[in-house]
Image (spheres, rainbow, N blue to C red):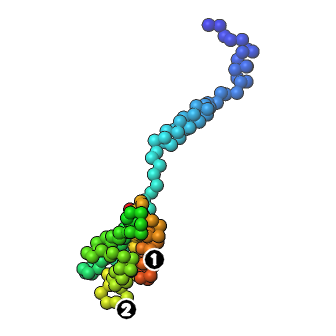
Amino acid sequence: MPAPPDNEVGRAAARPPTRLSFNLTAMIDVVFLLLIYFLVATDFKLGEEIYRLDLPRRSLRADPFELPRDPLRIAVASTGSGAGYLIRVEGAAAQPASFQELFEFLAQNQQSAAAVGGLFEPDHPIIIEPGPATRWEHAIEAFNAAVRARYSNVKFGGG
């Protein structure tokens, strides 16, 4: 083998040594792919939270004579083309025949200092349920009988 010419040896010695470098573009691509993978694979759920609850206090002995607060429903229906009407009080043994009897029934069954043994408090819900063909004055008379008996939670309902 012949020896290299002098000018080629000088060039190789004058050349700076090559440095190794990383290809950062490929590394950045890998980092972003890993980031996307973990974002997609992660299950985003809210952590457990503590909710404030106001639970009713339980008494060891419930009052066995306490009545439920279900509304008292009074159905009113007009009969015929005249001034006839029917009144039906849900759960009552004796049904009132007139609005005056309805007033007396409601007044007698209201709890108060004067009346002992009443079933309903003055704010007990009462729902007047007029039928589809009930005349307006009959529905209002039933409403007025409940208001005259000093009930404060009287409203109309569909029946």
Q: Are marks 2 and 1 in contact (CB under 8 Å)?
A: no
Q: Is residue 34 above or below residue 67?
A: above
Furthest residue toward top: 1
Report whether 50 appears left or right of 31.
left
Q: Which residue position is annotated with label 2?
A: 113
Please tell me which residue is depicted at 42% across the width and 78% down the height of the picture: 145
Report whether 56 appears left or right of 93.
right
Checking the image for residue 144, the label placed there is 1
Q: Is residue 7 above or below residue 45?
A: above
Please tell me which residue is depicted at 42% across the width and 63% down the height of the picture: 81
Please tell me which residue is depicted at 42% across the width and 69% down the height of the picture: 83
Furthest residue toward front: 82
Residue type (three-letter) at the residue carrying disc 2? Ala
- Where disc 2 sits, the SS reads loop
Q: 135 or 110, which is in the foreground?
A: 135
Whether residue 52 is visible here, answered yes or no, is no
Instruction: Give the percent coordinates (x, y) of residue 105.
Output: 34, 80
